[in-house]
Amino acid sequence: MSQQSGSVRKEIRLRIPCAPFVKTNAKSFQRNGREDAGPPAKEEPKRMDKRMNLLVFSGEYDKAMSALILANSARELDVEVTMFFSFWGLLLVRDPDKLTDEDKTLYEKMLGHMTPKGPDELPLSRMNYAGFGKKMLLEMMEEDDAPPLSAFLKGARKKNIKFYACKLSVEIMGFKPEEFIPEVEIVEAKTYLKDALEADMQLFI
């Protein structure tokens, strides 16, 4: 009797088919071996919803480049950028082709002719040496395939960065609204302060 029961159990074990085992993974396969739709689609990167405010007071080539590098880089991260130009910083956003002496005082005319006419004429903040230091720097930048300041300004204009010019600074220095690039909006200091207070980052250059 015991031998017969043992043979029956052995026969039962042999007759039970082996169920195909497939590695269970909810993202790739199910137990029956059928492949599902695959991994879920990647989500689009979320907008940062951040704001940066730069006050550009300096009128030197290297400092202006630093400001524009930060502004362009921030826009590539979907950060909203506002640039507020005051006094010497206004020289960065003057249009060399639109300068005028009309309705200006003698001093205003002198200042307009003595100051750089556009970004390409800005001096260095250090080691300028009557323009020789700047020439050396530009050659070094060219060797490293680095774009000039005017290219960074052009990029900032294409990226819809807000350009504000201090109204009082414009009036004191004798500049006319039509002398600036089209993107520049002349505003009071209060407008800048409101923007700066709501920004996540404020920089003074």
Image (spheres, rainbow, N blue to C red):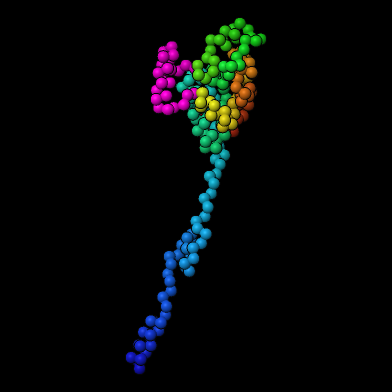
Q: Is residue 45 above or below residue 18?
A: above
Toward the viewer: 59 or 191? 59
Question: Is 39 situated left or right of 196 in this image?
Answer: left
Q: Residue at x 42, y 78 (%)?
A: 17
Q: Where is residue 167 in the image (x, y as percent from the top left)?
A: 63, 19
Which residues lie in the magenta part? 122-149
Question: Is 138 situated left or right of 203 in this image?
Answer: left
Q: Which residue is drawn at 65% across and 10% down?
A: 102
Q: Does the magenta stretch include residue 115?
A: no
**Quadrant location of the N terminus?**
bottom left
Q: Is residue 16 visible?
A: yes
Q: Position of residue 116 (x, y in %)?
A: 52, 14
Q: Residue at x 37, y 89 (%)?
A: 5
Q: Outermost residue, right direction?
A: 103
Q: Position of residue 22 (x, y in %)?
A: 43, 67
Q: Residue 106's quadrant in the figure?
A: top right
Q: Where is residue 39 in the image (x, y as percent from the top left)?
A: 50, 56
Q: Can residue 89 be seen in this view?
A: no
Q: Does the magenta stretch include residue 139?
A: yes
